[in-house]
């Protein structure tokens, strides 16, 4: 307390001494202007401003008020600046209004104060008064006006100010010229900014920096670096802002080697430890892929600022180094650096990538403590964590509670629903997004198209495509890839190829989507031709490419080509075959009846065969009625997945085909014991945006009567065309007449009858089935397609079948 009192006493003594110098009193005790030293008052007041001592400034003002009108205009402007610097704008305005005389400095001082406190309209009002009252228009006036217009987003008016500057001859002044460059930079008028720069007579370091930054901010990266080199050749040493602008240009051009040269310049000028330069260098090394070098540089930087921490965490999260991001976040907390919304967003991105639900919940709690839950970036990242961790309901809860939704918010929910297999809900969210007039992005369109593809919903897909055509995303590669996938999975493989051919540039995803589309439609030759074209392009085949081409060979029965491609994977492309590739080859060999070769290949798999491999061989055994090997395959599958309903059904069907009803009964008894239920056969057809579902023998449809009448007509016409039912397709121990009746109420025939009734004749009938189409339905639909003269497309669990004029695209090989 004694020390504190001595300090206050010393401060007051100094102020009194200053006051004694400024205010002398005549023997008459009347105010005496001659005895008042206004200059000393101003000097003392300036020292209080420099010291940040607001109270001392006010006490000096009080002494001046007691002496009457003793201050000249210079001192009054200093006093006005004192109030402005202490953010006492009300007192400053009162002093301004009481000033008997004002000059340009008076107006500019108060205007700058209002502008700094975001009271732009008050500042603009003062500038107007300055013009109306005819005060001097010097450089400070124009720099203040230009900064004010930029702050108010009124940059188009800078041209008018520029004209006035030119008339008064201030355009050659470096101070005014740099302000004009900054203003034109904000509105993107780089060409005029360069003209202003060239017109400055004596360019200083700030002018060069302003122009270099202008180029960098407006993506004229080459010009920015050229000007930086020109500045260096003229002997100017760059400052921290100049170096930051040059580094940004290096990033924009991906000229990382040039960026390292700029780093050298920063080292020579000792700016490498500056926060702006250091952040730009971190970004340079992280973006160039030299994440280790970025980490080394980060370790050498001061650790008391949040920006380097946040940037490094973000780059780790974006570089598939999520564990490193989380470790750095832990270190940041130990260093007592408080995270902001961007830090939390990056850390949560790392949690989402690693599917760390518990960690995500802990950070969620931390976000609540610091009050950042309502921040849109943080809430979006939290939604993403919960969606990717399978808790989409928590994402929806955050979505509902969030006060602000941007396009990323909507996209996160849409993507979350698509990834969790709830495509219909994703479509509903997209519709709501449009109702709220939120503009979709390429992420939105690609995700919604993915939802349409998973539902095989062509009509919504067509509508989304029509929306895309009206936007700039029509040429976007990601969106085009999604369109190819959607059309392929909705049965419109020709439209998929049209999109593919119209792309400006195809990437690996484009080629893979088209090859896999051809494979799915049984067009093996087309898929292989496209693969040959891909090899001649700049795109390199990857694992997914070979899944597509091997699947195409399997669907088309192209054994020699399939074997050659499989062998070339490791030999010519350095791609180690994975389980999907082995599964394709096992299906190819098994479908052709080469069971010994298939079994040998399974034995050569360098790891344990998966369920997919044994299931593929089991499917081939069912087709070829190889009961012994099929039983072994089924046993292997059930050892890994005891409750797999598809395997039980395939085993039962295989026994039923061989009329071994005792084995059929045994399999069904086993299913009952394990409470395994067979997935019911289901077919559906879409008409005018409404999906109509049918099960075997379904009579629940509102138009049930006309559907069955259509079935009777089809039955009559197919018999006249020579169709004979294959009763062996009904795997039940009943009479042939009952088998024939059951065949005609299969779900795909009910869907076909409805489609022929309600879908316009000019359109194809598209039927989706959740199981493999039976052989008799395949035969009868071929016959029907011929006499109704319509294309019928059936997508079963394995592939597409296009029926035209009595012929199927699969060539009866499926």
Image (cartoon, rainbow, N blue to C red):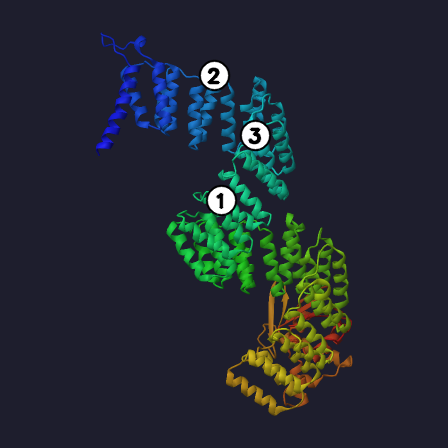
Between 108 and 801, which is closer to the camera in this rendering?
108
Gap in Å between the C-alphas at discs 3 and 1? 24 Å
Most extreme residue toward the front is 268
Name the element at disc 2.
Answer: loop
Mark 3 crowd level (few <14, some 14–19, many ≥20, 10 Å Cα): some
Give the residue drawn at x 49%, y 44%: 300
Gap in Å between the C-alphas at discs 3 and 2? 38 Å
Q: Earlier in the sequence, mark 3 or mark 1?
A: 3
Name the element at disc 1.
Answer: helix
Q: Which residue is mark 1?
A: 300
Instruction: Give the image quarter of residue 2.
Output: top left
Between 127 and 615, which is closer to the camera in this rendering?
615
Q: Quadrant of the C terminus?
A: bottom right
Q: Earlier in the sequence, mark 3 or mark 2?
A: 2
Q: Does the CB distance between marks 3 and 2 fall below 8 Å?
A: no
Q: Position of residue 165 (x, y in %)?
A: 56, 21
In this view of the protein, can residue 215 be seen by the observer?
A: yes
Between 472 and 507, which is closer to the camera in this rendering?
507
- Left or right: where does residue 97 sit relative to residue 711? left
621 lies above or below 246: below
- Left or right: where does residue 215 sit relative to residue 117? right
Instruction: Give the image quarter of residue 534.
Output: bottom right
Q: Which residue is mark 2?
A: 135
In this view of the protein, can residue 809 be seen by the observer?
A: no
Instruction: Give the image quarter of residue 8.
Output: top left
Q: Earlier in the sequence, mark 2 or mark 1?
A: 2
Q: Which residue is mark 3?
A: 237
Mark 1 crowd level (few <14, some 14–19, many ≥20, 10 Å Cα): few
Q: Position of residue 504 (x, y in %)?
A: 71, 50
Gap in Å between the C-alphas at discs 2 and 1? 53 Å
Nearest to viewer (mark 3 / mark 2): 3
Most extreme residue toward the left is 2
């Amino acid at each position: 307390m004694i020390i504190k009192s001595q300090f206050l006493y010393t401060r007051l003594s100094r102020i009194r001494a200053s006051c004694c110098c400024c205010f002398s009193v005549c023997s008459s005790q009347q105010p005496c202007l001659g005895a008042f030293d206004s200059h000393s008052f101003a000097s003392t007041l300036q020292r209080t401003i420099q010291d940040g001592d607001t109270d001392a400034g006010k006490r000096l003002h009080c002494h001046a008020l007691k002496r009457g009108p003793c201050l000249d205009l210079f001192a009054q402007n200093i006093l006005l600046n004192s109030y402005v610097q202490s953010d006492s704008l009300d007192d400053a305005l009162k002093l301004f209004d009481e000033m008997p005389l004002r000059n340009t400095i008076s107006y500019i001082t108060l205007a700058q104060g209002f502008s700094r406190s975001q009271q732009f309209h008050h500042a603009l009002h003062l500038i107007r008064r300055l013009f109306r009252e005819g005060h001097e228009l010097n450089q400070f006036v124009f720099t203040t006006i230009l900064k004010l217009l930029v702050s108010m987003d009124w940059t188009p008016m800078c041209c008018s100010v520029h004209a006035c500057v030119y008339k008064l001859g201030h355009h050659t002044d470096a101070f005014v010229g740099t302000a004009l460059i900054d203003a034109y930079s904000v509105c993107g008028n780089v060409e005029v900014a360069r003209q202003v720069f060239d017109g400055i007579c004596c360019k200083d370091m700030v002018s060069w920096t302003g122009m270099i930054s202008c180029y960098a901010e407006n993506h004229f990266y080459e010009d920015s670096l050229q000007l930086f080199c020109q500045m260096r050749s003229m002997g100017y040493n760059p400052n921290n802002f100049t170096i930051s602008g040059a580094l940004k240009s290096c990033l924009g051009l991906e000229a990382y080697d040039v960026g390292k040269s700029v780093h050298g310049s920063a080292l020579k000028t000792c700016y490498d430890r500056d926060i702006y330069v250091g952040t730009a260098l971190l970004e340079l090394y992280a973006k160039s892929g030299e994440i280790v070098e970025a980490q080394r540089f980060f370790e050498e930087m001061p650790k008391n600022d949040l920006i380097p921490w946040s940037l490094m965490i973000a780059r780790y999260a974006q570089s598939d180094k999520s564990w490193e991001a989380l470790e750095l976040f832990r270190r940041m907390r130990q260093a007592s650096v408080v995270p902001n919304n961007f830090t939390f967003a990056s850390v949560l991105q790392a949690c989402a990538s690693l599917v760390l639900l518990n960690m995500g919940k802990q950070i969620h709690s931390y976000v609540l403590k610091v009050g950042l839950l309502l921040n849109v970036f943080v809430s979006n990242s939290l939604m993403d964590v919960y969606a990717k961790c399978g808790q989409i309901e928590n994402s929806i809860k955050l979505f509902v509670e969030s006060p602000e939704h941007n396009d990323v918010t909507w996209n996160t929910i849409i993507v979350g629903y698509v990834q969790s297999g709830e495509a219909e809900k994703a479509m509903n969210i997209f519709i709501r997004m449009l109702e709220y007039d939120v503009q979709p992005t390429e992420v939105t369109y690609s995700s919604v198209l993915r939802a349409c593809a998973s539902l095989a919903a062509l009509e919504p897909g067509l509508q989304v495509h029509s929306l895309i055509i009206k936007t700039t995303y029509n040429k976007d590669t990601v969106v085009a890839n999604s369109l190819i996938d959607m059309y392929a999975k909705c049965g419109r493989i020709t439209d998929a190829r049209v999109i593919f051919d119209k792309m400006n540039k195809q990437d690996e995803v484009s080629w893979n989507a088209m090859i896999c589309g051809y494979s799915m439609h049984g067009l093996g030759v087309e898929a292989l031709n496209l693969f040959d074209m891909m090899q001649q392009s700049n795109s390199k085949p990857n694992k997914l490419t070979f899944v597509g081409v091997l699947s195409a060979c399997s669907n088309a029965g192209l054994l020699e080509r399939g074997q050659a491609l499989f062998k070339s994977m490791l030999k010519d492309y350095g791609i180690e075959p994975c389980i999907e590739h082995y599964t394709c080859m096992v299906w190819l060999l098994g479908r052709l009846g080469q069971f010994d070769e298939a079994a040998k290949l399974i034995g050569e798999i360098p790891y344990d065969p998966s369920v997919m491999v044994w299931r593929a061989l089991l499917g081939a055994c069912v087709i070829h009625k190889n009961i012994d090997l099929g039983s072994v395959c089924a046993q292997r599958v059930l050892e890994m997945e005891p409750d797999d309903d598809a395997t039980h059904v395939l085993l039962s069907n295989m026994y039923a085909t061989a009329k071994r009803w005792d084995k059929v009964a045994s399999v069904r008894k086993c299913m009952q014991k394990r409470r395994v239920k067979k997935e019911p056969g289901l077919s559906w057809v879409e008409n005018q945006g409404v999906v109509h579902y049918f099960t075997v023998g379904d009579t629940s449809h509102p138009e049930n009567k006309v559907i069955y009448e259509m079935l009777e007509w089809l039955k009559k016409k197919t018999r006249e065309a020579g169709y004979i039912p294959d009763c062996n397709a009904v795997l039940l121990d009943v009479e042939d007449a009952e088998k024939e009746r059951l065949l005609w109420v299969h779900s795909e025939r009910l869907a076909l009858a409805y489609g022929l009734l309600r879908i316009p004749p000019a359109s194809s009938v598209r039927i989706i089935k959740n199981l493999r189409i039976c052989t008799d339905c395949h035969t009868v639909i071929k016959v029907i397609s011929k006499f109704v003269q319509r294309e019928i497309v059936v997508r079963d669990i394995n592939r597409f079948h296009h029926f035209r004029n009595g012929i199927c695209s699969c060539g009866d090989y499926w």
